[in-house]
Image: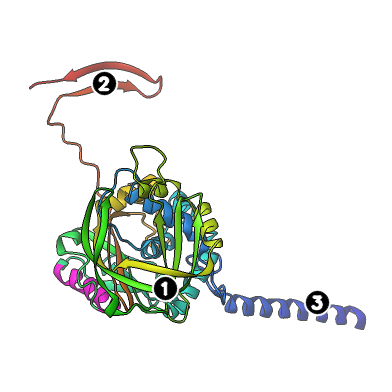
Amino acid sequence: MNNNSFTLLLVHRMLNFVSAVLLLTLVGVVSPQCITTNDTQSPPLHPDLGHILPFSLGLFKELYVPGSATGNFFFSPFSIWNALVLAYFGSAGRTREQLQRVLNLKNPADTLATYKAVDRLSDYVIDLANRIYVDVNLPLRDCVNHVLSEEVQLLNFSQVNEAANKINQFVSETTRSKITQVVTPLDLENAVMAVVNAAYFKGLWLTPFKTSLTSKDKFFTSPNQHTLVDMMNLNDYFKVGISSELGATVLELPYKGEAASMFVLLPDSAATDDNTTTPLDSMLTRLTPYTLRAALATLTNQEVVIKIPKFEMEKRIKKELKGALQRLGIRDIFSNSADMSIFDPSRQIILEETIHKAVIEVNEEGSEAAAATVGFFIKILPFRIICNRPFLFFIHDNHTHNILFMGVYRQP
């Protein structure tokens, strides 16, 4: 072998060695993926959650149906969205597609990054906390504990009293005791996992109402019926506008810091689509993401005389929430078709029930609100076929696809 051949061989071997070292190095630095194709994607500095609006309004209209709903209503679509996003991280296949479509999510990687960004920035406006309580006997994938290390906690769901106390304690602490109980031990029977969101908001008005001006005044529940309420009064400059599309006057009441506001949509007294609907129902029927965005875009700063009741409200939603989500298109996760294989590779868990509770108090100083959402999963139960009533039967040739015998068993 001459010197040139020896040199080429040596260079070739060195290149192979360097390539092997480089490959091993790259393998060492690439983080294993678990929930998405890029679990380490950097969170955006200024997350925009405007894409949630269609889900929020759609769910509201399913829970408070214009034309048939009565009485007061209050809930937090953001709390419900957060709990469902936790379930989304554990889903795959058609289950993930349904959640992604209804929740208006772009893709798992972007959703995880946005979720982390919102969790980091939420303290500016709202205290938000999420948990994934996993039964000690459910083999959750190890990488999930790494990606969602703050959310995942082990819990012995066979001890239903202790499990309910643990969840309620978490909710109570996050909501400053505004919500002390959201689940009961009976709710958690057969549960093996629970996704939980708790949210708390307290805002002081940028321009507070004077308590000395609050007085009893009429509130008309219908054109011919009224009741007396504690009516707050204020005269100052606020952003206000009229939406002809909604048939309503729109008012913005900002909180201190102006990072959050309460918007009031007051239907015109004569704004009805027909003689059978109320102005409120007519406005709710017209309410869409488009008409709402258009209404908010027309607000201008004007002097306004405001009269608004001070009030408190509390609402617990259980079975209605599951039905509403199914009508919106989130179906598989509640059935044996559920694919939660990102969390549970055995694909043996389904979302059994969802519970939501929300409270609010509005007074002269500002507003205080809290909400909690719990979705608990159970293991898929085997089909139960108990032939204790008349049934049809037949003997089928599976090669020729032919019914050989057929009958009805009606009585012993």
User: Dot 1 corresponds to which residue?
Assistant: 148
Above or below residue 108? Residue 145 is below
Q: Could you tell me which secondary element the residue under label 3 belongs to? A: helix
Pick the front one: 246 or 64: 246
Q: Is residue 199 visible?
A: no
Relative placement, left or right, of 366 versus 45 is left
Q: Nearer the viewer, mark 3 or mark 1?
A: 1
Q: Quadrant of the N terminus?
A: bottom right
Residue 197: quadrant of the picture: bottom left
User: Dot 3 corresponds to which residue?
Assistant: 12
Above or below residue 164? Residue 186 is above
Q: Amino acid at mark 3?
A: His
Question: Is residue 166 found inside the magenta-colored segment of the image?
Answer: yes
User: Dot 2 corresponds to which residue?
Assistant: 394
Q: Could you tell me which secondary element the residue under label 1 belongs to? A: loop
Cα distance between the residues tagged 3 and 1:
45 Å
> Tag 2: Cα neighbours inside 10 Å, few (<14), some, or many (≥20)?
few
